[in-house]
Image: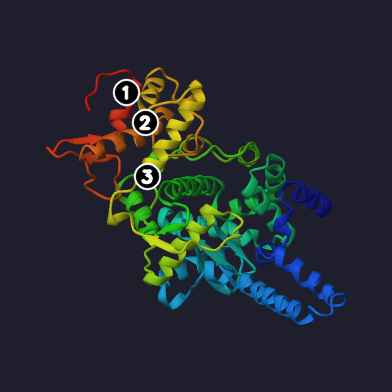
Amino acid sequence: MSRWQMLKIILRVKPSVLLPGWMVRSTGLMVIVPVGAAGLLVVGPLRWMLMGLMGLAALALLWNAGRAGYRWRNPVLIPAEHPELAALVSEAAGLAGVAVVREMRLSGVAVMSARKGRVILGMPLLIGLSRDDLRTLLTMEFVYRRSGWLDACLTHAWLTTTDEQAAHAVQRLRRGHWEAAGKIVGGDRLGVALRRRWQVEAAFLWCMARFVYQGTYPADLFKLFRWKVEHDRLLDRVEPPPPSPAARGLARELGWPDGPITSTPGPTVFFRLAEKVEDRLCRAAAHWAQDEDLKGAPPSHAFRVDDGPVDSSGIAALVTQAATELIGAEATPQDVVDLVAAGRGGELDWRYGHMSCPHPTPGVCALVPLLEQSLRKRGYTSPHPYKLRELVGPAGDTIDLHELAAKIENGLPYEL
């Protein structure tokens, strides 16, 4: 694929990826400064006022350039403080023929890259992937390091828009890299690791959608995610989104197996972070969840999920609103129950209905927040702050919200 073809796709899909993030965030200020400078030549009496305004605009431009920038979002990992992870990265680099790893950085979202010897590792992947999977995927990223700036822009455009033409273009570019990495680590091994990565990404996206609220961030986001992975079988319960037709076609062309993952992942990499670093990563992840272009300021109000029950009223309201739109009249929670019992849960058009989640069916997904809200009003509480589907009543009885919702969906008798 030629550079011009790639550029045409980027300009059609998301041209802003061609600009640095700080420049996109500062577009308005970049217009004010030259306009103000031109105004100085015309409006004499207001010269000093305009100069002051331009000075303020220039200061704002500099502040905006550094706000929530690359270095803030991706803190450095010091190898001496994380020897196990550093050894794994060095091993992957050696497999790919990279002599020197210049630096390692962390990210709050599920990303991984190794461009120009600079490694970025997403916290969700470090929590959810085994050592073997991490080594395999890092080897692929080190092989992919030879890609150019326009390749990276095209990949970013595809990831933020899910445009199918961009997806096909990215897969065509990556074929050689996937094939080369497969020869090093084994095609089947790489295929399984990629699918496990997609599984972790889907699980973490659900966690952010469920626990990140506008203007705030959960300071225990990664503690929560780790607990749900290790103790609540989150990765087993979340179905990863199907790969794009382009990715599926490429995997088949390379002869990699498709279908469910049957092998058991090995142990993960052990590492600890300073509290302030983990807090920053939680904040950065919430910022991305609320604004993928990172134009606004990062959320500043922190809360902890393990400090108290999570409010599900907002999610319940979304379900009820979807039912209102479906039946064409003001809906109640009972209307949602009736729709799900009638087998129409999949017809509800709402935010969580279009993403991978740990609920077995769309109907169960729609009922859980309504049931949780109703039971909490009756005095039911969560025995564990991170296991929200299990509630205990004032009399000591335990209700599994997934099981209760499934009974309703299947028309079985139930008690509340």
Position of 32 with respect to 277 (left or right) is right
Q: Amino acid at mark 2?
A: Leu
- Residues packed near mark 2 inside 10 Å, few (<14), some (14 to 19) or many (20 plus): many
Residue 243: quadrant of the picture = top right
Query: Splitting the image into 4 quarters, where does residue 264 fall?
Result: top left
Q: In the rendered image, which residue does mark 1 sit on?
A: 408
User: Is 302 or 228 nearer to us in this picture?
Assistant: 302
CA gap, disc 1 and disc 2: 9 Å
Quadrant of res 366: top left
Q: Secondary structure at mark 1?
A: helix
Nearest to the observer: residue 212 or residue 227: 212
The answer to whether any part of residue 1 appears in the image is no
For disc 1, the neighbor class at 10 Å (few under 14, some 14 to 19, many from 20) is many
Residue located beneath label 3 in the image: 234
Tell me: 294 left or right of 362. Answer: right
The furthest residue to the front = 45
Residue designated by label 2: 367
Mark 2 vs mark 3, foreground winner is 2
What SS does tag 2 mark? helix
In the displayed structure, 5 sits above or below 356; it is below
Q: x, y (%) of residue 252? A: 62, 37
How crowded pointer 3 is (Cα within 10 Å; few <14, some 14-19, many 20+) is rated as many
Q: Gap in Å between the C-alphas at discs 1 and 3?
A: 23 Å
